Amino acid sequence: MPATSKTTLTNLQQELLQLYARQISEEDLKNIRELIGAYFAGRLTSLADAVWDKNGWTQQDMEDILNEPGQ
């Protein structure tokens, strides 16, 4: 008998499974993907802004970071 492993789904996976249990149009699916992408992009921007503020970086600091060799 093959070994089985029990995988616990995250709350996000559970929510998405409930959503995707319904048949939706390709257009709706595309829009949902864009919404999810926009949400996580917004979160990332907020986190980056917080680090920026915490470090007191200026526009010149950003230019220096972007122009570092090997970047």
Image (spheres, rainbow, N blue to C red):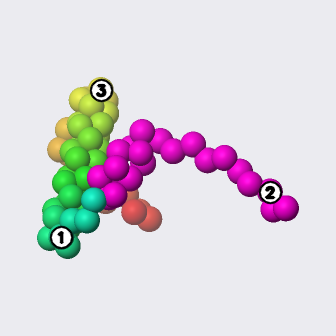
Question: Which numbered dot is residue 54?
Answer: 3
User: Residue 70 lies in what quarter of the image?
Assistant: bottom left
Question: Which numbered dot is residue 52?
Answer: none
Q: CA distance from mark 2 to mark 1?
A: 38 Å
Q: Residue at x 42, y 48 (%)?
A: 13
Q: Residue at x 27, y 31 (%)?
A: 50
**Segment tinted magenta in the rendering:** 1-21
User: Are dots 3 and 1 in contact, CB under 8 Å?
Assistant: no
Question: Which numbered dot is residue 3?
Answer: 2
Label 2 vs 1, first from the N-terminus: 2
Q: Is residue 17 above or below residue 30?
A: above
Residue 65 in view (yes/no): no
Q: Tag 1: residue type?
A: Ser
Q: State the residue position of label 1.
A: 25
Label 3: few (<14), some or many (≥20) within 10 Å? few
User: Residue 67 lies in what quarter of the image?
Assistant: bottom left
Q: Is residue 19 magenta?
A: yes
- The residue tagged with tag 1: helix, strand or loop? loop
User: Residue 43 lies in what quarter of the image?
Assistant: top left
- x and y, in percent, of residue 37 in the image: 25, 56
Q: Nearer the viewer, residue 10 or 17?
A: 17
Q: CA distance from mark 3 to mark 1?
A: 44 Å
